[in-house]
Image (cartoon, helix red, strand yellow):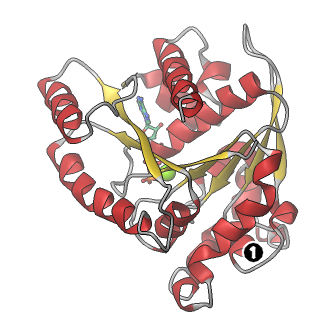
Amino acid sequence: MSARIIAVTNQKGGVGKTTTVINLAALWARFAGNGRILVVDMDPQSSLSELFLGSEFTIDRNNSEMPTIKDVLQGLPIQNAIYEVELGSVGQYNASTLHVIPSRDELREIEMVLPSTTNGMFILADQLYNIKDAYDTIILDCPASLGTFTQTALFAATEVVIPVSPGKFELRGLVNLREEIEKAQSPRVNPNLKITGVIPLRADRTNLAKQTRDSLAQYFPNLILPSVPNRVAVAEAHAAAMDIFEYSPSDDAAAAYEAVLAELIRRGQNG
Ligand SMILES: Nc1ncnc2c1ncn2[C@@H]1O[C@H](COP(=O)(O)OP(=O)(O)OP(=O)(O)O)[C@@H](O)[C@H]1O
Ligand SMILES: [Mg+2]
């Protein structure tokens, strides 16, 4: 069976995309078993890569010969840029191996040229096609823009998951995101791409969070996934370079990510 390829995207900065990818991937890998889940860092900010591979990888220039997503987008066979990350066991969560294709800041260098390279915007799709049978799920962590790297992810993905945090401007931005998804869904690009769900993040009891949820339910009927609360443990785990299940497995945010994952798996099974 070939992998689901899930682009996690929202062009608004700092909504919690990367944190969501980290926690879902860490949980999914423990659940699915060694090497069945791959995450790809599509963001030159490389915060996902820093968390899983350490700042030595993302910052230290001595590592510059170690392949990243930039090399993959320039044609290096994708297998050469996959790194294995060991996730420890904690409580009811098993140890597992997660696969990661990292990025570094230098990814920026190809943002302008990739679209004018022959087939450039489809290189990621072609590369992932070659490995899709080796994985259950491939998750793409997109940057805070609708530019080259988000587009190339939408061209390669089978699904889109949209994390949203409370706020009026967040909702306005979703109109543009939807247009971008519709462009990717055009017949000659990626007609089978579908939106699997929207995750209300940092959901709390404020009116703003409630209004955001209500508007989301209207704008994306039947697509709202379980929400993730605003919890200091989530931010602390991120700062400590851990997933929430290692850092604070009893926190209700850990249970919330479990609920999101269960629903993502269910929606995947229902096609
Ligand atoms: N549920 C949450 N509760 C509390 N803090 C959170 C939650 N989710 C994310 N954060 C914090 O919010 C900040 C931004 O999160 P993150 O980096 O995941 O966002 P992003 O959308 O990936 O940002 P960018 O657009 O820059 O890539 C981080 O400090 C993170 O720890
Ligand atoms: Mg991010």
Along the viewing direction, whichever of 46 and 139 lies nearer the viewer: 139
Q: Position of residue 184 (x, y in %)?
A: 43, 66
Q: Is residue 123 above or below residue 30?
A: below
Q: Is residue 184 rendered to the left or right of residue 28?
A: left
Q: Compare residues 55 and 78 and report the one nearer the observer.
A: 78
How far across and how far down the image is residue 189, in percent?
Answer: 50, 71
Q: Could you tell me which residue is drawn at 74 percent across and 71 percent down?
A: 72
Compared across the picture, whether 269 is left or right of 189 comes to right
Left or right: residue 219 versus residue 113 is: left
Q: x and y percent of residue 267 in the render?
A: 51, 30
Picture quarter with the N terminus? top right
Task: Say which residue appears at 72% left-offset and 80% top-offset.
Answer: 74
Q: Disc 1 beta carbon < 8 A from ligand 2? A: no
Relative depth, front residue between 244 and 199: 199
Residue found 60% across the figure and 90% down from its top: 117
Residue at image coords 26%, 62%: 176
Q: Quadrant of residue 222?
A: top left
Q: Is residue 214 visible?
A: yes
Residue 247 drawn above or below residue 78: above
Classify mark 1: residues with Cα within 10 Å, few (<14), some (14-19) or many (20+).
some
Q: Is residue 16 left or right of residue 95?
A: left
Secondary structure under the numbered disc 1 in the rendered image: helix
Indicate the quadrant where residue 107 lies: bottom right
Q: Is residue 41 above or below residue 1?
A: below
Residue identifier under label 1: 71
For badge 1, the amino acid type reads Asp
Q: Is residue 109 visible?
A: no
